[in-house]
Image: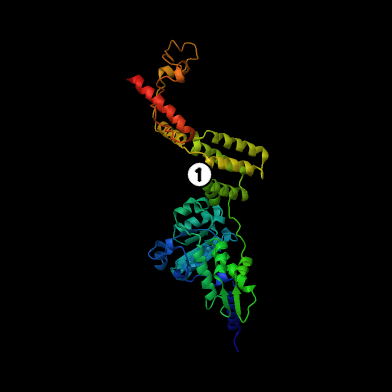
């Protein structure tokens, strides 16, 4: 008869085995070595720095950044299995400074008494506030812990700068459809951790459907596959996953959009660049994505106004008029009708001829001013409105252009022609260029 401690140990092992068997498929088939990880060849391929560090057990503090389901937590677990260090983990959603301090105190004791390093994995580290992140700094700096943080948010927006400077940052890419299909096939045929007691046949188009709608999220794909298997009655111990079953098992993914983080800036950037690139369809998509996610229409309207001047400019001076009118109309109309007005303005700017000559010109002029280039106002351009100005010679020699044919007379205005503004041969600006070229020719004739 076993004594109580042994019985307790047996019950503990039995409970652990049951929990392991009942764990979600994504957890059961999680990678156990670097070679099990699918994708991320840019950091884990042969000879890549992170792979070399893991294989040599020379891990320094890391921030793993990427979309949900791309493998951040799986990679941390692989590091835990490989390293000779102790490994502790925290979830930033459920843990506070108290739990963090207790974990760090244990790591310090381990380092003193056992000479062993401790790796601390903080999942969703962007959820830690500044005080919590600052609490990590001294012990990361002193080597009491090696930090591995995982985040779906751009760490340059969500992690404090001192912690970033002490960590290597690795961006994990979303998995491709081929990567996801490979993971699904591995799960279906895994002899121990998948469904060893079932024969599962999955049609290719079923796996492709799951991979397509998972949108690079391995966890989402594996959860969908598990639903498909568990809800399909077996026939002769065989489960057949068809396209119809797959469609029932995974729904379209909600758009992930954080109005203050990476998604906000990336979507806005794509919107602006689509208008600049004369692609109204892409401009409408990115605008719809922002508005659908709750972006303020004023923000969208401001971006259109900026593009109207920066990217269209004088090639079509009506662009800024349309953009400004759209902005003003949105103020008193509101959503959802405001999206129609914004769509008109965005497509107008996208389809208009493009010139950034005004934008480049003011940039060059501002640079000269900031660098200290000083140009004295010529006497003939100086102000003459006050008594005594003429006695000082102010404005002497000024020639009023409207007194001359074509409203132009050669005259120096302080800066050489062509210093900053270089109109292009597109749209309305082509007319401006022709007019300026004619004026420059008259200037040359007057100097001969």
Residue at the spot x=63%, y=44% of the render?
A: 339
Give the image location of residue 376, x and y in percent.
Answer: 40, 23
Q: Residues within 10 Å of mark 1 (few under 14, many from 20)?
A: some
Residue at the spot x=63%, y=78% of the render?
A: 234
Give the image location of residue 321, x and y in percent.
Answer: 57, 34
Give the image location of residue 284, x and y in percent.
Answer: 57, 47
Label 1 residue SS: loop
- 160 or 425: which is nearer to us? 425
Give the image location of residue 129, x and y in percent.
Answer: 56, 53
Q: Name the image quarter holding residue 434.
A: top left
In the picture, the quarter occupied by the C terminus is top left
Q: Which residue is mark 1?
A: 278
Say above or below: 378 vs 34.
above
Q: Is residue 201 visible?
A: yes
Q: Is residue 58 visible?
A: no
Say above or below: 4 vs 72.
below
- 9 or 339: which is nearer to us? 339
């Amino acid at each position: 008869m076993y004594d109580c401690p042994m019985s307790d140990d047996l019950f503990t092992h039995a409970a652990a085995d049951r929990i392991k068997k009942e764990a979600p498929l994504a957890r059961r088939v999680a990678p156990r070595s670097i070679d099990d990880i699918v994708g991320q060849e840019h950091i884990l391929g042969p000879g890549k720095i992170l792979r070399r560090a893991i294989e040599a057990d020379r891990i320094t503090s890391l921030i793993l950044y990427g979309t949900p389901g791309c493998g951040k937590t799986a990679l941390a677990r692989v590091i835990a299995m490989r390293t000779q260090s102790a490994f502790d983990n925290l979830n930033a959603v459920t843990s506070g400074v108290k739990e963090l301090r207790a974990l760090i105190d244990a790591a310090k004791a381990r380092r003193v008494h056992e000479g062993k390093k401790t790796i601390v994995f903080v999942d969703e580290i962007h959820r830690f506030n500044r005080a919590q992140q600052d609490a990590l700094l001294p012990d990361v700096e002193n080597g009491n812990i090696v930090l591995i943080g995982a985040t779906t948010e751009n760490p340059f927006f969500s992690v404090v700068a001192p912690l970033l400077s002490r960590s290597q940052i690795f961006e994990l890419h979303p998995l491709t459809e081929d990567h996801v299909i490979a993971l699904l096939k591995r799960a279906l045929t895994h002899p121990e951790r998948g469904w060893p007691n079932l024969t599962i046949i999955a049609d290719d188009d079923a796996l492709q459907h799951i991979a397509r709608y998972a949108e690079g999220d391995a966890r989402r794909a594996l959860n969908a596959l598990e639903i498909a298997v568990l809800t399909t009655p077996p026939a002769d111990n065989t489960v057949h996953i068809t396209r119809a079953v797959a469609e029932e098992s995974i729904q379209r993914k909600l758009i992930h959009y954080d109005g203050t983080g990476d998604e906000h800036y990336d979507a806005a950037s794509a919107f602006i660049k689509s208008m600049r690139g004369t692609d109204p369809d892409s401009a409408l998509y990115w605008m719809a994505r922002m508005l659908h996610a709750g972006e303020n229409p004023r923000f969208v309207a401001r971006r259109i106004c900026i593009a109207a001047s920066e990217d269209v400019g004088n090639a079509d001076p009506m662009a800024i008029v349309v953009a400004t009118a759209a902005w003003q109309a949105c103020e008193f109309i509101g959503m959802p009708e405001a999206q129609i007005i914004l769509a008109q303005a965005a497509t107008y700017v996208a389809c208009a001829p493009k010139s950034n000559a005004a934008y480049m010109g003011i940039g060059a002029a501002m640079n000269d001013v900031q660098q200290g280039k000083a140009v004295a106002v010529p006497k003939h351009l100086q102000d003459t409105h006050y008594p005594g100005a003429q006695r000082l010679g102010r404005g002497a020699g000024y020639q009023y252009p409207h007194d001359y044919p074509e409203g132009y007379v050669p005259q120096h205005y302080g800066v050489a022609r062509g210093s900053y503004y270089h109109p292009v041969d597109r749209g309305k600006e082509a007319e401006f260029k022709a007019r300026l070229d004619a004026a420059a020719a008259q200037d040359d004739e007057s100097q001969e």
